Amino acid sequence: MKTLLINGSPRKNGNTHLALTEVAKSLEAEGIETEIFWLGNKPVRGCTACYACVSKNLGKCIFDDDVCNRLSAHFAEADAFVIGAPTYFGQPAGALLAVVQRAFFSARAHVEGKPAASVAICRRGGSTAAFQCMNMPFEMLNSILIGSQYWNVAFGRDPGEVTQDTEGMQTMRALGKNMAWVLKNLHRDGTVPRSPQEEWQPMHFIR
Ligand SMILES: Cc1cc2nc3c(=O)[nH]c(=O)nc-3n(C[C@H](O)[C@H](O)[C@H](O)COP(=O)(O)O)c2cc1C
């Protein structure tokens, strides 16, 4: 079993990376494989709402010139997801949102129904808003949202400072343990678990 952790900070080894590493170590200690995928700091597109991914059934974004499809190529082999981002103006960093919106829209089949969590880092405030914002996609993808002993947030400004937030680091370890526990129980009989669902009946509010 494998958890894919997505680092949405432009600082590769910054506080988001350190918090996700704490989650990953906790998962590994429970026998769950992990991979931390850094989105990088190159420009990324926002979704253009062209719907090509859906109408052509691409399974990926039609725009192949940034990190989006390199990330979503890892989705199929992931049994669980953690997305992490620094808080910018009380929101998740923009690049993380841009990539997640495109990747989850175009490759949603490989995200749906799996355990998932978000992690938000900040200097002082706004991380709970960012955390809730990152949870929103999972809450409409039949995901099993994993919590911790507190909201999945930790504090620090300069790279490394988050390790001084001992409670925040403990929150990350508890998240890892909760996710491992859910994964092990879900996969206990060796099948890929999905809750039985009716066929989706989208209704676009057009009368
Ligand atoms: C553009 C920008 C906006 C920020 N906005 C906030 C904020 O709203 N609240 C806060 O507490 N910290 C804010 N910060 C600080 C970062 O969240 C903090 O430095 C965080 O540790 C960065 O994570 P990283 O090391 O993974 O990049 C902001 C930083 C930047 C660059």
Image (spheres, grey):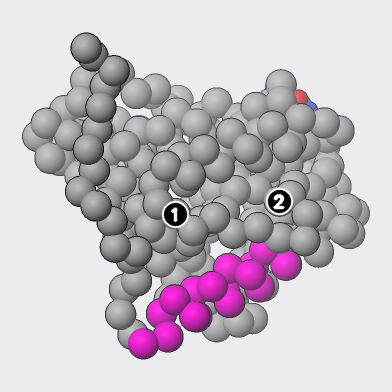
Q: Residue at x 33, y 65 (%)?
A: 194
Q: Name the residue under label 2.
A: 152
Q: Is residue 77 visible?
A: no
196 to the left or right of 92: left
Q: Is residue 19 above or below residue 49?
A: below
On screen, 19 above or below 207? Answer: below
> Which quarter of the rendering shows the C terminus?
top left
The location of residue 72, given as percent across then percent down, is: 33, 48
Q: Is residue 174 left or right of residue 27?
A: right
The answer to which of 66 and 188 lies nearer the viewer is 188
Magenta region: 174-189
Q: Is mark 1 on a helix, strand or loop?
A: loop
Q: Quadrant of ligand 1?
A: top right
Which image quadrant is residue 120 in?
Answer: top right
| Residue at which label 1 appears | 143
Give whichever of discs 1 and 2 has the lower sequence position: 1
Q: Is residue 60 left or right of residue 18?
A: left
| x and y, in percent, of residue 178 in the image | 63, 70
Q: Identify whether 101 is placed above or below 47.
A: below
Report the amino acid beneath label 1. Ser
- Residue at the outermost bottom position: 189
Q: What residue type is labelled 2?
A: Asn
Nearest to viewer (mark 1 / mark 2): 1
Q: Which residue lies furthest to the left in this view?
A: 56
User: For numbered disc 2, what is the local secondary structure?
Assistant: loop
The alpha-carbon separation of the residues under discs 1 and 2 comes to: 17 Å
